[in-house]
Image (cartoon, helix red, strand yellow):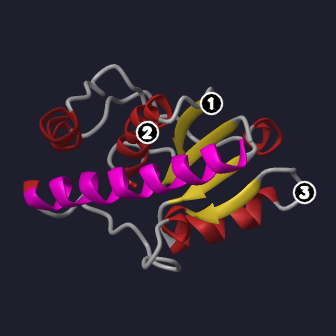
Amino acid sequence: MNSVLFVCLGNICRSPMAEAAMHEAAARHGLDLTIDSAGTGDWHIGRPPDTRAQAAALEQGNVDISQLRARQITNRDFLEYDLICALDHANLRDLRAMGGDGPAEISLLLDFLPGSEGHAVADPYYGSDADFVGCWRQLADATEALAQKLAMSA
Ligand code: 4NP
């Protein structure tokens, strides 16, 4: 397993936070991984993460995600990534509809977090700053669990 892509709807809230949290987790576990994120939708292409996501990443994870820019998932991603993690069930459905033939494994991110299997990471876009903080913490736990699993099978 060499590469992981995180996918949400807009690529400005959940998946860029997941990307950043996974970078931290991979570094802690000594994993050499290509890590990126994308959205299923095209509304925010080229935009930086939502300022509330930037603040949560900085305050909770000490990570600056202001340089990230949203992009939309492409068919190539299904060929280039070993694992594509959907943040919620709609993302998972959209990914399966798009990429059935590629070699990428497609999963819900929270399937890797013991006790949260089958659950979605709730979209904080219409929520509060506290929802973004909660989202970061959930993503930090999930990416830590994923990195642990990848480190054990490396
Ligand atoms: P994300 O959040 O999928 O976690 O990036 C959203 C961002 C934007 C919208 C919805 C969700 N939107 O409707 O514009």
Q: Nearer the viewer, residue 3 or 41?
A: 3
Quadrant of ligand 1: it is bottom left
Q: Is residue 109 above or below residue 6?
A: below
Q: Nearer the viewer, residue 43 or 105?
A: 105
- First along the sequence among labels 2 and 3: 2
Span of residues in magenta? 130-154
How far is disc 2 from disc 1 in space, using C-alphas?
Answer: 11 Å
Q: Is residue 149 magenta?
A: yes
Q: Nearer the viewer, mark 2 or mark 3?
A: 2
Q: Amino acid at mark 1?
A: Leu
The residue positioned 43% from the left and 47% from the top of the image is 15
- First along the sequence among labels 1 and 3: 1
- The local crowd at label 2, few if under 14, some if 14 to 19, many if 20 or more residues have their Cα within 10 Å, is many
Q: Amino acid at mark 3?
A: Asp
Residue ID for mark 2: 25
- Disc 3 on helix, strand or loop? loop
Question: Residue 99 location, x and y as percent?
Answer: 79, 56
Q: Is residue 7 above or below residue 56?
A: below
The residue positioned 51% from the left and 44% from the top of the image is 42
- Disc 2 on helix, strand or loop? helix
Q: Name the disc covering residue 101, or none.
A: 3
